[in-house]
Every structure is written in C-alpha cells, then in structure tokens.
Image (tube, coloured by chain):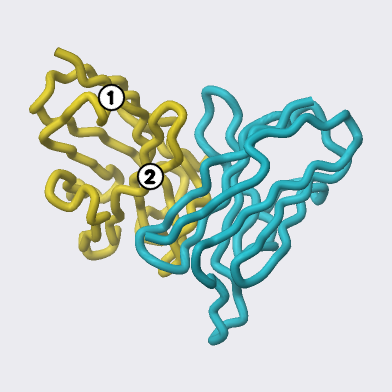
Amino acid sequence: DMMMTQSPDSLAVSLGERATINCKSSQNVFHSANNKNYVAWYQQKPGQPPKLLISWASTRDPGVPDRFRGSGSGTDFALTINSLQAEDVAVYYCQQYFTTPPTFGPGTKVDI
Amino acid sequence: QVHLVQSGAEVKKPGASVKVSCEASGYTITNYAMHWVRQAPGQRLEWLGWINTVNGNTRYSQTFQDRVTITMDTSATTIYMELSGLTSEDTTVYYCARGPWGHWFFDLWGRGTLVIVSS
C-alpha cells in the first residue's frame, strides 16, 4: 500500500497567521494522462466525520473558504491555511487515491 | 439536504459479526459510489472497501477481504457493511463515505457508527 506521511504532527498558529501542513506520498501520484495529482485533503473536528476540503491536490470543494490552498505535485504536497480562524482548529489529513487501496496520512493537529 | 445517515452504536462479543447501515438521502444514490472507512482512536483512517451503487459490484481492501461484505438493499437507498470475526482491534468508528465514480476521494461522510468489541 502507498504510504502517506505528514509533517508536522501538530502546530500552533496565532489567529490571522498562516499554517502550512506538508504531505509526502511514497510513490508518484501524478497522472500524466490527465495532468492531475491524486491527492485530497480533509478537515476533521472533534466528534465529527472528516470533511473534504480539496481534491486533485488543489481544487477546493464547493463552499470551502479560499484561505485553504492546496499545492504540490508528484510526491510532495502542502495544505496552507491563510489567516487562520478559530474555526480552523482541527486535525487535517491528506489522502492519495492514485492506487488501491486509497490511503491516508496520520493527520496534523492545528491549534491556536 | 444531502445526508448519509448511519445506524447506531453496537457492542459485540469477540468472534461475532456486526452489520452497519448507511442510508443516503437528498441525492440520487446511483450517481456516486459508496465506500466504508474506519478510524480507530489515534490511528489513521483506513479504507475497507466500496460498492458500485449501480450494479452492486464490490471491491475490498486486502486487509479486510476475508471478513467484510458490503451490500445494498433492493430499494437502493441503504448500503450495509458487515464485518465478521470481530476482535478488540475492530473497536473503532466506521464511516460510510460517498465518492465520485472512478476516483476514490470522499465528498460526503456519514456521522460514523461506533462498534465496541468486548467480552
């Protein structure tokens, strides 16, 4: 199975500041046939299911604020939260869907 | 409103089976695939398998291949996940999650069903 790693494990950011979470896949997840990276990002708040933020490494799901930005290609990806808000406190997961089974990173906890 | 409504928490004995349901509402179920993902405390999310909501075909993770069965009811609004041979390591929250055809990311999740395996 493809391994996904994330760094850091947790980070604390001041309100209004930027948070950056890194994700690395053990294999290339870029598909040259459609020029897409098969990576998604999720946000999970306590007691709630994960919520899709970004698919295709950089495409925000409808309704996701534009302060959430996904980037990267190949094996290295990042989720950036610009101007962190109190409601952004959560655990964030990356996921690859390039190969079966789809696999997730261990999560990064973001705190204020 | 678009929802995935899951059945309630279960307590099972080791060696038993559990069957969790997931009812889709607010959208046409056959427009999306349905997956099952579980999340143990402190562990990463783990994909169990998926069902083609059009023809009922399934595919399972090799980790759970021998123990998991995903089915649909004939009205095609409810998906079921049955896990057999339960051990304490199966004590976790099980989610159904909707995904677009052909691409296995998950854009809608149920609220989760806690399964506790205890003697």
Find residue A106 and report its horizontal and vertical position in percent: 52, 42
Q: Residue at x 60, y 75 (%)?
A: A36
Report the residue at 47% width, 41% height from top: B109
Where is residue B76 shown, x and y percent of the image?
26, 50
With B98 as the anchor, is B80 left or right in this view? left
Q: Around disc 2, counting alpha carbons within 10 Å, would you say few (fewer than 14), some (14 to 19), or many (20 or more)? A: many
Q: Nearer the viewer, residue B34 or B14?
A: B14
Per the image, the residue denoted by label 2 is B46
Find residue B113 and report its image quarter. Answer: top left
Taking the view exactly as shown, the residue that stands out farthest to the right is: A16
Residue B39, by quadrant, is top left
Cα–Cα gap, marks 1 and 2? 15 Å
Residue under the point 50% across and 34% down: A49
Quadrant holding the C terminus of chain A? top right
Furthest toward the bottom, the residue is A33
| Image position, residue A37 (x, y; %) | 59, 70
Q: Is residue A63 above or below residue A27?
A: above
Discs 1, 2: same chain? yes
Is residue A30 depicted above or below B112 in this figure? below
Q: Chain of mark 2?
A: B
